[in-house]
Image: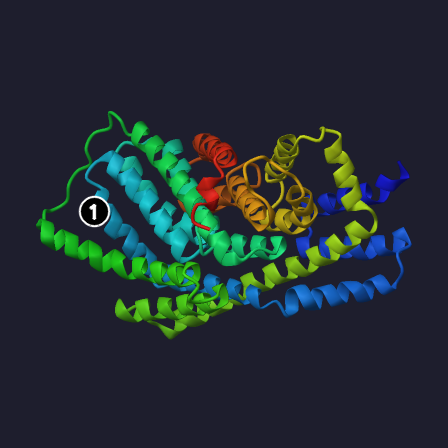
Amino acid sequence: MSDIILPLAMAVLTLGGILAGYRVAFVLAGTSAIFILLSGLPTAFFNLIVSRIYANVLTNWLLVAIPMFIFMGLILEKSGVAERALKGAQRALGGTAAGMGVAVLVIGVLLAASSGVVGASVVLLALLALPRMTEVGYDKPTSAGLIAASGTLAILIPPSVMLIILGDQLQTPVPDMFAGAIGPGLLLVVLYGVYIIWRARGLPRAAKGPTTGLLIGLGRTLVDVAPLLLLVVSVLGSIIAGLATPTEASGLGAFGAILVTVLYRKFDAAIILEAARDTVLSTSMVAMVIVGATCFSAVFKGVGGDAMIRDGLGLFGDSPWVVLMVVMGAIFVLGFVLDWLEITLILIPIFAPIIGGLDFGNGLSGQALLIWFGILVAVNLQTSFLTPPFGFALFYLRGAAGDQIQTTEIYRGVIPFIALQLLALGLLMAFPWLITGLV
């Protein structure tokens, strides 16, 4: 019993500090320092933590891709390039209510693949698409649910900051993680699309604007969407084809985003500086959390936390599938109160060795097994953006929509999409080739 007191107390103190509103990075690092002293670990443990921070964070070349992809997304969002692409897609597909819903979903995919920033995607979709969806007859909960769910695709569809960090924590190649996420991303898009088309049945046809001719309309759509699509294909293609590392491709994406603004005559030094400043802020936050999580992980293992987790999972039996379901359930529940970054950095170093040593009878082992597990975690964590009370996509949508929609309507609207995400998670467990087919 005494073996679990310290790790359990450490977990409770950490969760309590986060829920109390203290900065996550400082809670993780501060809890680690306290329990080094309380546990009787040698003071040399501080030296070990410093070495881990230097090796795993400060000299980790892979993590350089994070600020570059954030910068790329911010440039596209602040310059209005992403907004132009959304309007082009809506023109092309907005002839019916179903077409309007599909247009929102399509542009959500483009924003996801070009930025990887959930906040920017949700806010932009809310400002542009929410009024139009209600105009063609969608009820507010359905409109809110589609916008929030489409925006959260930015955390799963590559290039994704989550996949970069998951790949780093699992010690798996990030290009393989990107390739593994394509199938699940498309699966979610199909499920969302089928649902929104079903919801659009019986709605009247949207009013058409002035006709401009097929060729002119097609040309205008290509002008609006093609540069963004070309940028996405260039970045992802170079990574998956092995022509560039994620870090190199992120630099290509950032430079390409600036070129797109020049092409559209939207280039402005003030926009570049604002995007750079916001990138520094976002990257600093991520880096501080990674440093704090590195401290927490080392001390938690030092006081026997990993043994406590293994023993706890053992209470559910030795079936690999039961263990996986328990892990997925824990991640889903924690997503109600914690951000994906904390869950990833705290739990994955503990759960990954356990899952990596199991045989699920699906032909996966070694690195392929960890990639499968990592993508399952990513799909699971995507729900954390939609689950109340702390789903960030819900906050972004509520702030952008203002008085157009109520919080209760947003909550009602996301429930079907959370169910679709869980359905996708079950399909990915049952059919691992949906993940590994492109790896």
Foreground of the two, 150 or 137: 150
Q: Nearer the viewer, residue 275 or 245?
A: 245
Amino acid type, residue under disc 1 in the picture: Ala
Task: Compare residues 406 and 181 and report the one nearer the observer.
Answer: 181
As drawn, 279 above or below 14: below
Residue 309 visible from this viewpoint? yes
Task: Please tell me whether residue 314 is drawn above or below residue 260 in the rendered image.
Answer: above
* Numbered marks: total: 1
- Name the side, left or right, on which 186 lies relative to 312: left
State the SS at label 1.
Answer: helix
In the rendered view of the protein, which quadrant contains the N terminus? top right
Q: Residue at x 38, y 32 (%)?
A: 142
Foreground: 255 or 77?
255
Residue at the image position 73 percent from the left and 43 percent from the top: 16
- Tell me the quarter of the picture where residue 105 sits: top left
**Residue at 47% over, 33% down:** 427
Q: Residue at x 55, y 48 (%)?
A: 368
The residue most toward the top is 202
Q: Position of residue 145 (x, y in %)?
A: 41, 36
Task: Name the outermost residue toward the bottom.
Answer: 269
| Place of residue 199 in the rendered image (x, y in percent of width and height, measured from the top left) | 32, 28
Q: Is residue 399 visible?
A: no
Q: Is residue 227 left or right of residue 219?
A: right
Say few, some or many: other residues with alpha carbon within 10 Å of mark 1 (under 14 / 14 to 19 / 20 or more): some
In the picture of the structure, the residue carrying the numbered disc 1 is 92
* Residue 120, x across and y down, in percent: 43, 53
**What colouring does the structure picture have?**
rainbow
Question: Residue 134 in the image: x percent, y percent?
Answer: 30, 36
Left or right: 87 in relation to 337: left
